[in-house]
Amino acid sequence: MNDTPILALQDASHRYHGGGLSLDGVSLAIAAGESVGLVGESGAGKTTALRLLLGLDAPTSGAVLFDGVPLNRRDAAQIRRFRSSVQTVFQDPYSSLDPRQRIDRIVSEPLRSLGIARGRDAAVQAASALESVGLDADVLARYPHEFSGGQRQRIAIARAIVCKPRLLLADEPVSALDMSTRIQVIELLRELRERTGLALVMVSHDLGAVAALCERTVVLRSGRVVEAGTTRQLLRAPAEGYTSALIAAVPRLPR
């Protein structure tokens, strides 16, 4: 059995252009099939950590490890494997979908860009991905403006899972949605994880949403990890006052 994490930050730090630290010695590992929440208030370092995990930025010190090997953004073969294994769902379903493209082009884009499938094969896989998020294949010929916010986020999730990644990085995936739609999207992500074994990292300021999806939670403050453990334990008996404040800010935590 391979116990090597899919993706990890190893004592990773990152500096602003002005010299200040946006992330300071953060270590985080995501194993196959697990779900991890990364929480903190604005400015805590969540976005920086996400950008490092996505390979969009390189750490100033420390490392990003993909399957136990340092991620090298200049290694085309490694980056291709990385992109097929790690996909993303962004916060805003309105801006994350190109309004000029039909849904079939949007959802199948990872397949084409990674050289996995084209033409009819890509269309079939795109239809299957849409069906897996609760949308009929007849939406393929339509455009993003024809859908609600919740439907657009389902389309964004379909695009993220169409190449069957091992890990999904979700950046505030429900914060732009109304409450009833949030619940539906959280349930969808939970069902996808249970059915496919997909690993998940959910970046959020909302501990309520994280509690509904993530088995483990890492709390960031000012670029540092201040607390980490099982989500249940953090909610029941937080060790840090900062974590307690985050919990208190959630009006109602899902059971």
Image (cartoon, helix red, strand yellow):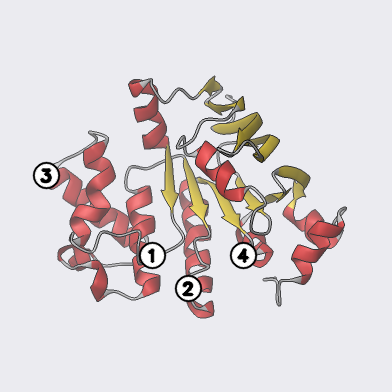
Are the residues flagged by discs 2 and 1 in contact, CB closer than 8 Å?
yes
Viewer-side label of 2, 3: 2
Instruction: Tell me the quadrant of the picture where the C terminus can be found.
Output: bottom right
Q: Which residue is mark 2?
A: 177
Viewer-side label of 2, 4: 2
Please name the residue shown 42% across and 64% down the image. 92
Inspect the image, locate mark 4, and give the three-letter code of the amino acid beneath it: Ala
Viewer-side label of 1, 3: 1
Does any portion of residue 204 appear in the rendered image?
yes
Does residue 56 appear left or right of residue 216 in this picture? left
Instruction: Tell me the quadrant of the picture where the N terminus can be found.
Output: top right
Inspect the image, locate mark 1, and give the three-letter code of the amino acid beneath it: Pro
Does any portion of residue 3 appear in the rendered image?
no
Q: Which mark is residue 93?
A: 1
Are the residues flagged by discs 4 and 1 in contact, CB closer than 8 Å?
no
Inspect the image, locate mark 3, and give the three-letter code of the amino acid beneath it: Gly
Question: Label 1, label 3: how many angstroms apart (C-alpha)?
Answer: 26 Å
Q: Which residue is mark 3?
A: 119
Measured from the top left, where is residue 50 in percent x and y?
54, 44
Question: Label 4, label 3: how many angstroms apart (C-alpha)?
Answer: 38 Å
Does residue 83 appear left or right of residue 226 in this picture? left
> Helix, strand or loop at disc 4?
helix
CA neighbours of label 1 inside 10 A, class few (<14), some (14 to 19), many (20+): many
Please name the residue shown 57% across and 30% down the image. 59
